[in-house]
Amino acid sequence: PIFNNLYRLQAAFSSSELQLFPTFLESCPVLKNLIILDYSVSEEPEQFELTNVPRCLTSTLEYVEIKELIMREKTGIKVVNYFLENSAVLKNLSLRLADSPMTTQDSEINRKLLTSTKLSRSCEVSVY
């Protein structure tokens, strides 16, 4: 199905479902605001590539918030980079990191995120 009038979406998914995520977003062509409430990492993450870029990423998606993100997981970093590298009109990407003590590795990941390549020049990344 196509959800032509869906402008705001709250969703939860796991890393094992991540390869289906772009296909799901393709069914939301005018999505402006995406909130990922829960992003759980499978015990055995699958190898996959996020190559499909849905229309909403190139034309309408302005705000993405990911709650409870575990940045040490490769799939978490993949999701963040997917939005930054493919969202043409993204204004803000907010990341709420899962409750865990901040490590040196986390600080390095955060620094890379704040300076990573973004398709949208006006995109601000917030990490909290």
Image (tube, rainbow, N blue to C red):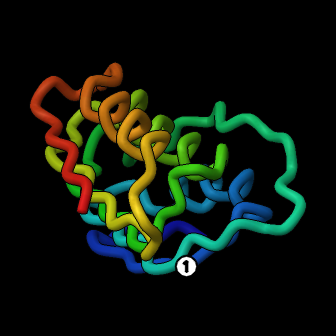
Q: Residue at x 70, y 66 (%)?
A: 41
How far from the left and from the top, in percent, is residue 81?
A: 47, 36
Q: Is residue 125 above or below residue 38?
A: above
Q: Is residue 71 left or right of residue 23?
A: left
Image quadrant where one finds the N terminus: bottom right
Q: Residue at x 36, y 28 (%)?
A: 112
The one of 65 and 26 positioned closer to us in this rendering: 65
Q: Is residue 114 left or right of residue 46?
A: left
Q: Is residue 10 left or right of residue 30?
A: right
Q: Residue at x 64, y 53 (%)?
A: 23
The one of 2 and 50 positioned closer to us in this rendering: 50
How far from the left and from the top, in percent, is residue 117?
A: 34, 20
Q: Is residue 93 above or below residue 58?
A: below
Q: Is residue 52 above or below residue 60?
A: above
Find residue 88 and report its image quarter.
top left
The one of 16 and 77 positioned closer to us in this rendering: 77
How far from the left and from the top, in percent, is residue 3?
A: 45, 71
How far from the left and from the top, in percent, is residue 34?
A: 34, 66
- What type is the residue that disc 1 sits on? Ala
Q: In the displayed image of the protein, which residue is found farthest to the top?
A: 117
Image quadrant where one finds the C terminus: bottom left
Q: Residue at x 22, y 56 (%)?
A: 63
- The residue wearing badge 1 is 12
